[in-house]
Amino acid sequence: MAKVKHKDIKIKRHRTLDDKILYATTDIILVLLLLIVGYPIVYVLSCSFSSGIAVSNGRVILWPVDPSIIGYKLVFAYKTVWTGYANTIFYTVVGTALNMLLSILAAYPLSRPNYQGRKVATMLFTITMMFSAGIIPKYLLMSDLHLIDSRWALILASAISAYNMIIIRTYFRNSIPGELIEAARIDGCSELRTLWSVVLPLSKAVISVVTLYYAVSHWNSYFQAMLYLRDRDLLPLQMILREILNASKINAEDVSDPALLAELAGAADLVKYALIVVSSAPIIAAYPFVQKFFEKGVMIGSVKG
Amino acid sequence: MKTKQATQSAAPSALALQRNRTPFQRFLVRFKKNWQLHLLMLLPIAYILLFYYTPMYGLQIAFRDFKPRAGIWGSEWVGLKHFIEFMSSPKFFTYVYNTLAISLYSVCVSFPIPVILALMLHVSERKVLKKVTQNVAYVPHFISVVVLVGILNQVLNPVSGIVGTFYHMFGGLGIAPDIRANPGTFRHLYVWSGIWQQMGWNTIIYVAALAGVSHELHEAAELDGASRWKRVLNVDLPAILPTVSIMLILRFGSIMSVGYEKVLLMQNDLNLSTSEVISTYVYKVGLAQNRLSFGTAVDLFNSVVNVTLLVTVNAITRKLTSGEQGLF
């Protein structure tokens, strides 16, 4: 609607010099920003597709030098990269599923204006956003629950985020007509049935966005694994990444193929770049699928709940 | 909102019935009406009570000499001993200073940038440029801190990184200086890498608010002869001011908390003098050195300061805007 109007006006408008300067400066700054944000991304990608020696000697500036995919071959020679990848997929899928379950279960009653105890429950959630007991009491609790060195530690340590739950609640409250819910209830639907068959099908936008938020946070988190896990077989990809990125030498035990080990020695930097790409690509690739929902104003409701 | 609620619950027959009941009976009637919703709520509430509120109960170890074997109640009560120890140690000022320096620097620089960027995206009429810039600027948000710091370390590597390459390109001799190992550069690296990563993402909320600016306002201002710049100042900016103020309050509420995740990754032996902040100190002293009570006390001190700041800033904002804005 607004976009059509905009065009009509553009035809009539004649710009003054002031306006021209403003538009020109804005566009120049935007181009500069694009370069500043884009350059490191292109640089990392180019390095990952270059040869080991070109990267170690700093010969890559913009495009790949001696293009090759040897970096990626070497990355997948690490046994730990495979286990890390598998673990991360597990933590992300199971963790996000539980996140969504708990968030929706809490958001639905809280979105209902007549829900008994709405204020108390909202407050219980809001407090967790502003104040937390900190890592040590949390660690002691996890230890009391025998969750240290267990896969479930990473799933259960952050199974709901009040912030994300409130985004869903606000969307339920503002975007789904109360009459619709009332009608479903009068027709004999239970609350669970109403939530499942009436509310959720109308909330695909917010569900996709919040699922993305949760999935990204699981995929990218390393600190909880560092706190709660000792067993190397349970470590998520980010912890493996941290080790490899910090190491200046390659740990021979981590590589399965001895022939590749020799090649790896001269390509430590190349491997790091390839690893950065391999670990970040899946989550960045998920974003475009969810992007269209941002324009549906999911974010606006989240500011003032 | 409130009026809607009032009309719904004040249906005449319900009111007449409710008058004859004791508060407890009224509670029961409502409970019966709500039991299905309570059932849905059961799991999430049980979760936050167990995983968020039980640790709050465990916070009392900050006032005790906690020994895991004795349990919380079996450990001796020592009052403010740990707090006094922390505050009277010479490190106290260093850590508080480091935390505040990073945080204030970050608020001053990284807070206004997304606002300005959103305004520029709003002003620009080149659709393709806008779209491309916006979407490219979102990408870094999805990169993990581990990868971000990894990229930083690689790019700043004096031998293989781009820094070394440029250093030689502009006539530098020998090995380029190692920026990563310099305590003086830590804050700049921390803050500016954060800006690189988040500035695009943080515009979303302002871009959404700007999209809601009524077009009639712009038209009217234009007819009155306002230039585009004047309209930015008098139409666009006021429109996003409520959003900006809420984001600012939120930001101030966490002024004393610099996250440990990124700092821990960026720390090395050479930059510790500027990079050790309260949260990393809590992690090291509490969990790595196993001084559980002392670490909890330091963390609690930090959280209390944060909550106090949040409440104060919120109160001030409410006062300044006569109750119109503010979080709660």
Image: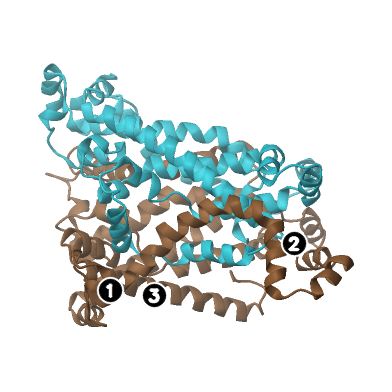
Chain colours: A cyan, B brown
Residue A63: quadrant of the picture: top left
Name the mark on residue A300: none
Numbered label attached to residue B62: 1
To which chain does the residue with label 1 belong? B
**Do the numbered discs 1 and 3 sit on residues whose CB atoms are within 8 Å?**
no
Name the residue carrying label 3: B304
- Is A228 positioned to the left or the right of B222 in the image? left
- Quadrant of the rendered image containing residue A36: top left
Q: State the residue in front, B315 or B230.
A: B315
State left or right for residue B101 relative to residue B28.
left
Q: Amino acid at mark 2?
A: Ala
Q: Position of residue B308 (x, y in %)?
A: 44, 77
Q: Gap in Å between the C-alphas at discs 2 and 3?
A: 48 Å
Residue beneath disc 2: B226
- Helix, strand or loop for disc 3: helix
Q: Secondary structure at mark 2?
A: loop
Q: Is residue B140 above or below residue A254?
A: below
Instruction: Inspect this view and state whether residue B79 appears.
Output: yes
